[in-house]
Image (tube, grey):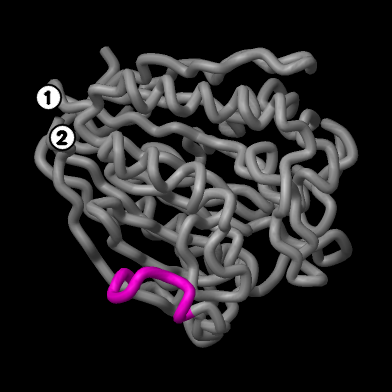
């Protein structure tokens, strides 16, 4: 019997052929006494387009992800975009799936579901091929551009909901090489369709812990700074519907903000590490609680644990130690 259950993965049709939703599996197999859900959050992990196809930061971060998953436990991974630098993949048989993903995250403890969304670099290639790859990999789960994950904490009635977004479809693509910010979505129809989907799911959510995940940040003090589109369209919804936290990547470092009751996790240090803090004055005063972009960390990620009472967020550097920890309470509905 499953220790906890994924209740649903929901999506709305776009004019493309969709892959099947991820199969339900016993995510807590082997840990029959488990009374929490544990997972890793990593963004911007997507290697290089040429040999050796990985960076030293990706290698180090992948190794520490494996060790953390073994020692602290991990039931799944949230992979938050820029999965393949610099122009995504060409097709479902692109060797990058092996070179940058399968051959790098080889620890047994990482042979768990990976729930994937696309970043701006992925949208420079074939995102639909990444969706189709779900049929070819036992752990790669990318059912649609945006989708809904629901879990029950083992041995409790406490629930966790994760809304996975495509912020590129929502806000537009960006040219990192010219530090360009997303200015407008490619299709306002598709952007509005996703926004309505998000509003409906936030409005209906009764989850004890509600996470929203995308690629672009709402708040960031680093190179890209806050994403104006998300500050206008997403932030008010997170506050109104009392989301627990928003998770993202895009800037290549680790950051944590607390603002208007919502936690903001930036975990974009999976492949590169960047100390840039040029937008430190572009975020709400006193909202930044933690930042690191030191090259000496060798990269990093976030580990999260949800119990029936709290969500614990721990930022971990690839050198193998925790850097910052914070606790978020259940939603008050």
Question: Where does label 1 land, which residue?
Answer: 156
For mark 1, does the 10 Å Cα neighbourhood hold few (<14), some (14 to 19), or many (20 or more) residues?
few
Is residue 283 part of the magenta span, yes or no?
A: yes
Tell me the CA gap for discs 2 and 1. 8 Å
Quadrant of the image occupied by residue 249: bottom right
Viewer-proximal residue, 313 or 40? 313
User: Tag 1 or tag 2, which sits nearer the N-term?
Assistant: 2
123 lies above or below 255: above
What percent of the width, then of the height, locates residue 217? 52, 57
Pick the quarter of the image with the N terminus.
top left
What percent of the width, then of the height, locates residue 234? 47, 43
Q: Which residues are magenta?
A: 280-287
What percent of the width, then of the height, locates residue 152? 25, 24
The secondary structure that dominates the magenta segment is loop
Whether residue 312 sits left or right of residue 199 in the image: it is left
27 lies above or below 246: above
Asked whether disc 2 touches disc 1, contact meaning CB atoms under 8 Å apart, the reply is yes
Whether residue 88 sits left or right of residue 242 in the image: it is right
Viewer-proximal residue, 317 or 145? 145
Whether residue 85 sits left or right of residue 116 in the image: it is right
Task: Say which element carries label 2.
Answer: loop
Is residue 20 visible to the viewer in this orientation of the structure? Answer: yes
Is residue 227 part of the magenta span, yes or no?
A: no
Is residue 323 visible to the viewer in this orientation of the structure? Answer: no
Residue at 54 percent across and 75 percent down: it is 222
Between tags 2 and 1, which lies in front? 1
Question: Where does label 2 land, which residue?
Answer: 35
């Amino acid at each position: 019997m499953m220790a906890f259950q994924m209740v649903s993965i929901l999506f709305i049709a776009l004019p493309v052929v969709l892959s099947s939703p991820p199969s339900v599996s016993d995510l807590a197999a082997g840990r029959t006494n488990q009374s929490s859900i544990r997972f890793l959050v990593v963004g911007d992990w997507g290697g290089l387009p040429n040999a050796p196809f990985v960076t030293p930061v990706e290698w180090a971060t992948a190794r520490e992800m494996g060790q953390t998953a073994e020692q602290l436990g991990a039931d799944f991974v949230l992979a938050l975009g820029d999965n393949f630098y610099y122009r995504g993949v060409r097709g479902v048989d692109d060797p990058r799936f092996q070179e940058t993903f399968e051959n790098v995250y080889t620890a047994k403890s990482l042979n768990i579901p990976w729930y994937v969304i696309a970043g701006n670099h992925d949208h420079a290639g074939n995102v639909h091929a990444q969706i189709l790859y779900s049929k070819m990999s036992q752990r790669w789960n990318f059912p649609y551009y945006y989708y809904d994950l629901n879990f029950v904490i083992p041995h409790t009635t406490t629930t966790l909901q994760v809304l996975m977004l495509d912020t590129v479809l929502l806000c537009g693509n960006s040219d990192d090489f010219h530090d360009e910010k997303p200015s407008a979505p490619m299709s306002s129809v598709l952007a509005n369709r996703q926004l309505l989907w998000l509003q409906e799911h936030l409005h209906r959510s009764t989850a004890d812990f509600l996470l929203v995940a995308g690629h672009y940040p709402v708040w960031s003090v680093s190179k890209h700074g806050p994403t104006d589109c998300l500050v206008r369209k997403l932030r008010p919804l997170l506050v109104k519907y009392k989301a627990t936290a928003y998770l993202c990547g895009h800037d290549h470092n680790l950051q944590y903000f607390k603002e208007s009751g919502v936690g903001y996790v930036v975990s974009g240090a999976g492949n590169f590490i960047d100390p840039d803090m040029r937008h430190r004055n572009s975020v709400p005063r006193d909202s930044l609680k933690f930042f690191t972009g030191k090259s000496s960390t060798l990269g990093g990620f976030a580990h999260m644990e949800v119990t029936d009472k709290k969500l614990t967020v721990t930022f971990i550097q690839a050198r193998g130690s925790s850097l910052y920890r914070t606790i978020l309470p259940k939603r008050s509905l």
